[in-house]
Image (cartoon, rainbow, N blue to C red):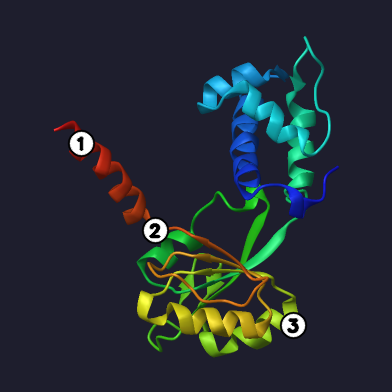
Amino acid sequence: MAAVQKVPDIVVGRLPVYLRALQVMAAEGREITSSQELGERLGISSAQIRKDLSYFGTFGKQGTGYRIPDLIEHLRRILKVDRMWDMILIGAGNLGHALAQYQGFTPRGFRLVAIFDNDPEKIGRPIGPHVIRDVQEVPEFVRSHQIRIAMIAVPASAAQQVADLCVEAGIRAILNYAPIHLKVPKGILVQYIDPAIHLQQMTYYLGNES
């Protein structure tokens, strides 16, 4: 197996997409698939899929295809989601409430264990099975529970300060929903989710249709 750091980021980014499609196939009762079929479902060439998977070894057999359960297990191990990752959420506004109640994290290997906010009116209130904690508790909680992942769902004006707090506490990976680019030390992983950016990309093409 190739060292993870030598695998292009764009390839790593496609692996969860493959995993999701395979899990859908498994839910449909499928046992076998091919790179051709997987590619048709995802709009990716079969050659690209085979090349991506080749970074991690040899999967499937020519003329036979891939056993879906086996490939799912391989991808889960590669992505390190064959275990459960505990994570925290900072920000208990409307978006934070939606994230706290989202049921899709746990089946994919992630467990929300605590929610934090700085609003005195929100602290102590429940969201689902969680009670909102004071954001000042983040460092102690992260260290005592060995948390490595945080989701940030705060206003842009507060996101950098929250990110700094997370990094100082020992967080190694941040999923940022705030519409701002974060400055973090080298080695800290950050992923951004900003729906407006994707909408603006689509309107570029829609505008060219008129």
Does residue 32 sit above or below 114 in this rendering?
above
Mark 2 — residue?
194
Mark 3 — residue?
144
The disc at residue 57 is none
The location of residue 75, given as percent across then percent down, is 74, 40
Amino acid type at image mark 2: Asp
Query: Which residue is drawn at the image coordinates 66% and 47% (left, top)?
Result: 8
Tell me if residue 10 can be seen.
yes
* Within-10-Å neighbours for mark 3: few <14, some 14–19, many 20+: few
Question: In the drawing, does residue 138 fall left or right of residue 120?
Answer: right
Mark 1 — residue?
208
Are discs 1 and 2 less than 8 Å apart at CB?
Answer: no
The location of residue 57, given as percent across then percent down, is 83, 34
Does residue 177 sit above or below 139 in this rendering?
above
Tell me the quarter of the image containing the N terminus.
top right
Q: Secondary structure at mark 1?
A: helix
Query: Which residue is drawn at the image coordinates 57% and 76% (left, top)?
Result: 184
Spatial separation of the CA atoms under disc 1 and disc 2:
23 Å
The location of residue 29, given as percent across then percent down, is 66, 20
Query: Which residue is drawn at the image coordinates 75% and 55% (left, top)?
Result: 5
What is the quadrant of residue 202 in the picture?
top left
Are discs 1 and 3 less than 8 Å apart at CB?
Answer: no
Q: Secondary structure at mark 2?
A: loop
* Within-10-Å neighbours for mark 2: few <14, some 14–19, many 20+: few
Spatial separation of the CA atoms under disc 1 and disc 3:
53 Å
Q: Nearer the viewer, mark 1 or mark 2?
A: 1
Amino acid type at image mark 3: Ser
Amino acid type at image mark 1: Asn
Residue most extreme to the right: 1
Disc on the earlier residue, 1 or 3: 3
